[in-house]
Amino acid sequence: MKKARIIGTGSYLPERVLTNLDIEKMVDTSNEWIKARTGIEERRIAAENETTSDLATKAAIAAMDMAGVKAEEIDFIVVGTITGDYPWPATACLVQQKLGASRAVAYDISAACSGFVFALDAAVKQIQTGAARKALVIGSEILSRIIDWTDRNTCVLFGDGAGAVVLEAAEGPNGILSTHLRSDGTYWELLYQAGFGARNPASVEGIEQHLPFLKMQGNEVFKVAVRMLSEVAQEALTANEIEIGDLDFFIPHQANRRILEAVAKRLKLRADQVYINVQSYGNTSGASIPIALDEANRAGRIEEGDLLMFDAFGGGFTWGAALVRW
Ligand code: COA
């Protein structure tokens, strides 16, 4: 079977920076509390006229430029997002239109913060089966639009952004070695958005009850996230007969520093293996892994032959890992 290889990365972060000091003026919190409990110092907030497909398109163009791939060569576009421009159509279709990628099949994946890893898995399978030769995998989110800015338990955690990769069918040993996905719907109520869908259709009362906003039981999510992120990472290593010490980069979903440190400790990762940028962007949900990957790649830190792992966890619950030979 052919391998899917990442031949370009891109990201886009909105210009506006919202610091912890700014949030201190909005809710009863402090810079010290946020830094100590989450590691987050600032996050980006999309401009009023920016949408999730705008962010996604900018990240995609950067990835395609790096790859030297034109829009009309793309066979498949998949966007991991829970904050699409509209409930439907898919944000991926809007990206397709903006890029002029007329040949592509385009759809979204709703796997919350695992969105990028789930989308990557879908694209890898398109390539492995021969259905696609070149694919665009995007994680793009404007979480700031579904955050309750009066809820200090959640509003300090999240930010906006997008990241993308271009995949190409390739011969040889380098590429995505394997993907490992998991879900457990029994946990759905620990992290979700109550309105407005078929369960709670749009209503004035719903707005008064803050239904359109993200709800989370943070400390419960924390415990499960640490366990699942560690387990699925181990599963990916075992499946490929790779030792944890062999990883050059562990690029996890940037949920918060304490989760990442707990996972690193469980897996016995060295600090230099773990890529963390949560301090700058907060939790950008499905966008966090491709943003971190692009940052490391553009800094020239990733070399051909390096071994990378992506590891994500999110609402659903969903979680998954991917192992990559660069
Ligand atoms: N500023 C100040 N105090 C805050 C606060 C804030 N922004 N948010 C919560 N608190 C308070 C709580 O009200 C609580 O006060 P109380 O003891 O008087 O009731 C206290 O801090 C402890 O709350 P708790 O929720 O137990 O804190 P925690 O150590 O679990 O940290 C999170 C809270 C949200 C940072 C942590 O649970 C977390 O990171 N969870 C995972 C969230 C996540 O990553 N979700 C996405 C997964 S993809």
Image (cartoon, rainbow, N blue to C red):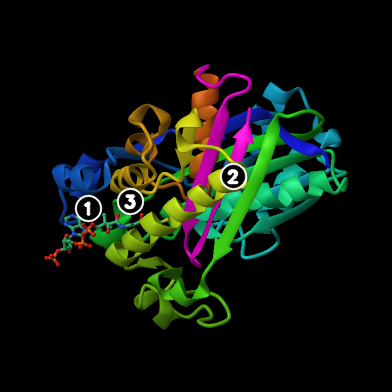
State yes or no: Cβ of the residue under disc 2 lies below 8 Å from any atom of ligand 1.
Answer: no
Looking at the image, which is closer to me, 116 or 57? 116
Q: Nearer the viewer, residue 61 or 85?
A: 61
Q: Residues within 10 Å of mark 2 (few under 14, many from 20)?
A: many
Label 3 – label 2 distance at C-alpha: 25 Å
Q: Quadrant of residue 134?
A: top right
Query: How many numbered marks have been drawn onto this rendered protein structure?
Result: 3
Query: Can you tell me whether the CB of the residue at mark 3 lies under 8 Å from the nearest atom of ligand 1?
Result: yes
In the image, the segment drawn in magenta is 300-326
- Tell me if label 1 and label 2 are in contact, CB under 8 Å: no
Q: Amino acid at mark 1?
A: Met
Q: Which residue is mark 2?
A: 322
Q: Which residue is mark 1?
A: 26
Q: Is residue 322 magenta?
A: yes
Is residue 51 shown to the viewer in this render? no
Q: Amino acid at mark 3?
A: Leu
Give the CA distance from mark 1 to mark 3.
14 Å
Residue pictured at 30% horizontal, 63% vertical: 218
On whether residue 231 falls in the magenta region, the answer is: no
Separation of marks 1 and 2 at Cα, in angstroms: 38 Å
Q: Residue at x 22, y 53 (%)?
A: 26
Which dot, 1 or 3, sits closer to the camera? 3
Q: Is residue 113 left or right of residue 70?
A: left
Dividing the picture into quarters, in which one does residue 16 lie? top left
